[in-house]
Each structure stands twice: as structure tokens, then as C-alpha cells.
Image (spheres, rainbow, N blue to C red):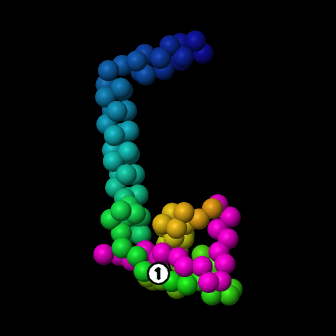
């Protein structure tokens, strides 16, 4: 058992293992960043986004509004997050009839 542990430590300490680990980690981070940045174009920074104003009607929820404006290929969760961010809404996302919300539009 001790020999197995020593071999594992030698492998982990080897220069080749460290190089491979760094390359794999770098690729993972790059792919993850690319996927997150391009997964949904609703995730455009607020200062690069245009928006339309809508007035909340009775019975509206942020989810319902997001489902109305999202394209068929859009993830509604991302649209909801963008509406919450753009309007500075609280975590409980309580909206009231007559309230005016900014709804993001894609440029």
C-alpha cells in the first residue's frame, strides 16, 4: 500500500503530469467561458443593451413577461435574470400592476 502511495506521489510530482494538467485545465476554462458567453445573447452587459418599456398588468410575473418576449431558442431563465438585473429587482421579484419595467432587446 505504501508503494502505491509513493508511486502516485511521484506521478503527481512529475513535470509531464503537471503540464498535462495545466493544458487540460486551461482548455476546460476556455471552453466554459466561451459557452457561457455565447450560450444566450440575453446575457449582454447592461450598458451594451437596448430595452423597451412595458407596463406590468394584473397577474403578470417576471417569468410570464420573459416568456412573452423570449425567442423560441431563448432560455427563459436567462431572460428573467436579465429583466431582474436591468430593473434592479429584489430576490423575491415582486412586481405590481402599473409598474414600468425595462425589457431587454437584442441589438
Q: How many labels does the image show?
A: 1
Image quarter for residue 19? Answer: top left
Indicate the position of residue 86 as horizontal and vertical percent values. 48, 66
Image quarter for residue 15? Answer: top left
Indicate the position of residue 68 as horizontal and vertical percent values. 52, 85
In the image, residue 9 above or below residue 29: above
59 and 15: which one is in front? 59
In the image, residue 41 above or below residue 52: above
Secondary structure type for disc 1:
strand
Residue at the image point whose x is 36% and y is 26% from the top: 17
Quadrant of image for the C terminus: bottom left
Magenta stretch: residue 92 in it? yes
Indicate the position of residue 33 as horizontal and vertical percent values. 37, 51
Magenta-highlighted stretch: main secondary structure? loop
Magenta stretch: residue 6 in it? no
Residue at the image point whose x is 36% and y is 19% from the top: 14
Residue 68 visible to the viewer = yes
Quadrant of image for the N terminus: top right
35 and 68: which one is in front? 68
Magenta-tinted stretch: 91-107
In the image, residue 66 above or below residue 87: below
Residue 78 visible to the viewer = no
In the image, residue 40 above or below residue 66: above
Q: Is residue 56 left or right of residue 19?
A: right
Residue at the image point whose x is 37% and y is 32% from the top: 21
Disc 1 crowd rating (10 Å Cα; few below 14, some 14-19, many 20+) is few
Image quarter for residue 61? Answer: bottom right
Indicate the position of residue 27 as horizontal and vertical percent values. 33, 44
Q: Mark 1 points at which residue?
A: 53
8 and 20: which one is in front? 20
Amino acid at each position: 500500500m505504501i508503494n502505491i502511495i509513493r508511486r502516485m506521489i511521484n506521478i503527481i510530482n512529475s513535470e509531464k503530469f503537471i503540464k498535462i494538467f495545466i493544458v487540460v485545465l486551461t482548455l476546460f476554462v476556455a471552453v466554459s467561458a466561451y459557452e457561457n458567453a455565447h450560450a444566450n445573447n440575453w446575457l449582454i452587459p447592461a450598458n451594451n443593451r437596448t430595452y423597451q418599456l412595458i407596463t406590468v398588468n394584473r397577474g403578470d410575473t417576471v417569468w410570464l413577461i420573459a416568456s412573452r418576449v423570449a425567442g423560441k431558442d431563448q432560455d427563459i431563465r436567462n431572460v428573467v435574470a436579465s429583466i431582474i438585473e436591468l430593473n434592479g429587482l429584489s430576490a423575491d421579484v415582486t412586481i405590481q400592476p402599473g409598474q414600468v419595467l425595462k425589457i431587454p432587446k437584442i441589438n
